[in-house]
Image (tube, helix red, strand yellow):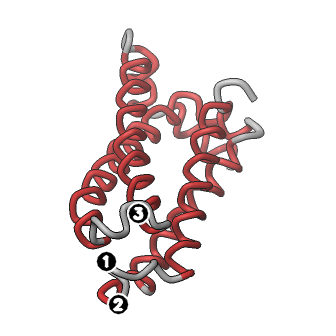
Amino acid sequence: MDDFLSWLEGGPLAEAIRGTAYLYPLLGSIHIIGIALLIGPAAAFDLRLLGLGRQQLRVTTVAGYLLPLSRIGFMIAAVTGILMFLPSATLIAERGSAPWKLGLLLFAGLNVLIFHRRTYRTVSDWDLARSAPAPAQTAAVISLTASTGVTVAGSLLAYT
């Protein structure tokens, strides 16, 4: 694994990021914007699943407006996160918070996959009038918790 991480650090893209003034902080700023676009709309959707606005907004309406923004945010955050990882891959991988961030990212992704492949398929049964079923509410709690954990662990990458 160390050889692979060293190879990443020595690549031309990593060298360009390290060698270009202000590129790393610019990537960090764009990364934060991506995180905001990912987590903000997703959190609002999760809160709808937990019952907020149940009588006013259909789940499908909320999903139609908010989840495309989250997808864009995910792409921005993923690309900039990888680019920020490259110049210091070995150092970042050794941080105690790195496995937490990666594990929570994978857990969040699995939660999204299960939600959309199973639970959301029955949304017509609980779109407006009824409470979301327990699996949808559980997915919302997992989403909110995992995104908070990823954010905290990501912030700690700079320190621990």
Q: CA distance from mark 3 to mark 1?
A: 10 Å
Residue 109 appears at what percent x and percent y? 50, 64
Residue 109 or residue 119, whichever sits in front:
119
* Residue displayed at 56% across by 81% down: 134
* Residue displayed at 45% across by 29% down: 14
Residue 42 or residue 107, whichever sits in front:
42
- Give the numbered dot on residue 48: 3
* Residue displayed at 68% across by 50% down: 1
Q: Is residue 110 left or right of residue 32?
A: right
**Residue type, mark 2 in image:** Asp
Callout 1 crowding tier (Cα within 10 Å): few <14, some 14–19, many ≥20: some
Q: Is residue 70 left or right of residue 99?
A: left
For residue 3, what is the image quadrant?
A: top right
Residue indicated by mark 1: 128
* Residue displayed at 45% across by 34% down: 11
Residue indicated by mark 2: 125
